[in-house]
Image: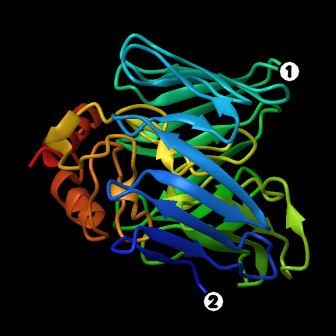
Amino acid sequence: MSPTQDSAAATAQAQPLLNTSLATRYSLTGRGAWTGRDRGGVHTTYTVDRRDGYQQVGSSPWTYDAAGALVQDATTQFRYDALGQLASSSTATVGRAYRRDALGRIIAETDTKTGAVTRYAYDGLRRTFRRTPDGQVDVTIDGAGLDEHVVTITASGQRRYLHQDRLGSVQLITNEVGNPLEWIRYTAFGEPTIKNSTGSYTLPTSAVGNRFGFHDHPQDWAAGLVDMRARAYRPAFGRFLSLDPMGLAAGSPNLYALGDGAALTFVDPLGLRKENDSFEARLDAEFAGAPANAQLAYGLGACSR
């Protein structure tokens, strides 16, 4: 059974696939903020403030900066740059620091616990190149859509084909002859469960080095974050870390929510505004071949229309 979501009833339920144990039921406000979550017999309560921020999750208070960006919860500290984009995240075991280019794209990611640096390069808005701390490189070839990654090719020539659902979330990774390498399943808000090739056991992170997940965005499995360009999305709590920089012009009353709390219905390719699943192909067709700065400017404009 696939994940289902019912915005009208303000509830969402994700059923397990491949014998996962992530059957989850959510209670939502009319603006898409969680008020409760039930999983594995455990109920968690979410206290919501007037801006739709979580004041408290369970017994743990959340703290925000003056701009409304989350800086501290029960497990993680976050820091932001002068433009409000995520600069670092840190837990007791996982730390990340991000270096961005002039267009706000992450070009270097440092593991602050080990000092290891992963570097990225882009084709316009698409993250296509990666060099890992040990010097290994891979390149990802895209399809027609903005977030439609088809195959990742390593320096040794190995190919990993990515298979997506209607909204772009990577569900299956296969090799050159079509044999499964990994499966990924998600809760209604994008929490991933990665399974081995047969689906018989769960992996803590991608064993084949896959870096694309929910809605086909770059996903940091260990840090629990999804890079949606303008903002970072945190699927474990079904929301962005910061308020939508477009404000109410984005057309959503809840400026933390992804797609008004309907993450199985809408995408947010730029982290700025919910769109239906046809938006990415239209955006890609209109700026195909344009330089990166023009693509970014168009993307911002498209999301304001």
**Foreground residue, 171 or 63?**
63
132 sits to left or right of 228: right
Residue 195 at least partly seen: yes
Instruction: Give residue 158's position: percent from left, percent from top.
Output: 74, 63
Q: Is residue 191 left or right of residue 256?
A: right
The amino acid beneath tag 1 is Thr
**Disc 1 secondary structure class:** loop
**Residue 136 quadrant:** top right
Tags 2 and 1 touching, CB below 8 Å:
no
Left or right of 279 in this view: 73: right
Q: Residues within 10 Å of mark 1 (few under 14, many from 20)?
A: few
Q: Quadrant of residue 207?
A: bottom right
Q: Position of residue 216 (x, y in %)?
A: 51, 60
- The residue shown at (32%, 40%) is 255
Q: Give the residue at the far right of this rendering.
A: 201
Q: Position of residue 165 (x, y in %)?
A: 50, 77
Q: In the image, what residue occupies the spot 83% across and 32% down? A: 134
Which residue: 63% across, 89% down?
Answer: 1
Q: Amino acid at mark 2?
A: Met
The residue depicted at 18 percent of the width and 39 percent of the height is 248
> In this figure, which residue is indicated by the disc labeled 1?
114
Residue placed most toward the observer, 39 or 83: 39
Can I make out residue 298 in this image? no
Q: Tell me how far mark 2 sits from mark 1, CA to CA.
A: 40 Å
Which is in the foreground here, disc 2 or disc 1? 2
| Residue position marked by numbered label 2 in the rendering | 1
Q: Is residue 212 above or below residue 293?
A: below
